[in-house]
Image (spheres, rainbow, N blue to C red):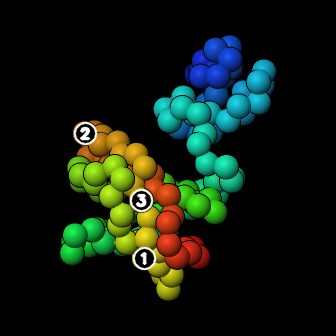
């Protein structure tokens, strides 16, 4: 178990994962030890689905990590740079959408990029 401090009320709680979003038992704020306070209004659904990102005529193969009504988190192999605020095109199976980059984290070990997007046009049906 890992001790986590709630970013809202600053009280300690415990979790088995720093990445999962959990509700603080004291103030009911949803947060993750790694990502902070939950910023999506709608619930996230965990998925592991291949996705293609199109950005400046470059296609990147990636995997969807989770999805909500207006946003997605995606894991991209390697260290990729996507400017925050930039609009990219997402393709999942037979659906597509335009999405704005909201955050990006590059990890060296393993070499992977995590990114969060807000859907601005279209709808994804994983």
Density class for disc 2 (Cα within 10 Å; few <14, some 14-19, many ≥20) is few
- Helix, strand or loop status at disc 1: strand
**Position of residue 55 measured from the top left corner of the image (x, y, whole percent):** 27, 68
Q: Residue at x 42, y 59 (%)?
A: 100
Residue reaching furthest bottom? Answer: 94
Residues at circles 1 and 3 in contact by the CB criterion of under 8 Å: no
- Helix, strand or loop status at disc 2: loop
Q: Earlier in the sequence, mark 2 or mark 1?
A: 1
Q: Residue at x 34, y 49 (%)?
A: 84
Relative to residue 9, is residue 119 depicted above or below? below
The answer to whether residue 78 shows anywhere in this view is no
**Position of residue 82 measured from the top left corner of the image (x, y, whole percent):** 28, 54
The residue identified by callout 3 is 100
- Helix, strand or loop status at disc 3: strand
Residues at circles 2 and 1 in contact by the CB criterion of under 8 Å: no
Q: Earlier in the sequence, mark 2 or mark 3?
A: 3
Relative to residue 91, is residue 100 depicted above or below? above
The answer to whether residue 35 shows anywhere in this view is yes
Q: On residue 108, which mark appears?
A: 2
Q: Residue at x 44, y 64 (%)?
A: 99
The residues bearing labels 1 and 3 have C-alpha atoms spaced at a distance of 14 Å
The residue identified by callout 1 is 91
Q: Is residue 27 left or right of residue 18?
A: right
Residue reaching furthest top? Answer: 11
Looking at the picture, tell me which residue is in the foreground, 49 or 82: 82
Relative to residue 52, is residue 93 depicted above or below? below
Q: Nearer the viewer, mark 2 or mark 3?
A: 3
Assign the C terminus to one quadrant of the image.
Answer: bottom right
Looking at the picture, tell me which residue is in the foreground, 81 or 21: 81
Assign the N terminus to one quadrant of the image.
Answer: top right
Q: Earlier in the sequence, mark 1 or mark 3?
A: 1
Q: Residue at x 70, y 31 (%)?
A: 29
């Amino acid at each position: 178990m890992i001790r986590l401090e709630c970013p809202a009320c600053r009280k300690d709680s415990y979790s088995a994962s720093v990445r999962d979003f959990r509700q603080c038992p004291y103030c009911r704020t949803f947060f993750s030890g790694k990502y902070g306070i939950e910023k999506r209004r709608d619930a996230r659904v965990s998925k592991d689905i291949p996705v293609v990102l199109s950005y400046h005529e470059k296609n990147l193969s990636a995997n969807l990590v989770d999805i909500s009504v207006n946003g997605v988190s995606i894991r991209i192999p390697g260290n990729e740079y996507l400017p925050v605020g930039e609009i990219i095109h997402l393709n999942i199976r037979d659906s597509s959408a335009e999405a704005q980059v909201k955050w990006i984290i590059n990890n060296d070990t393993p070499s992977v990029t995590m990114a969060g997007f807000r859907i601005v046009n279209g709808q994804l049906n994983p």
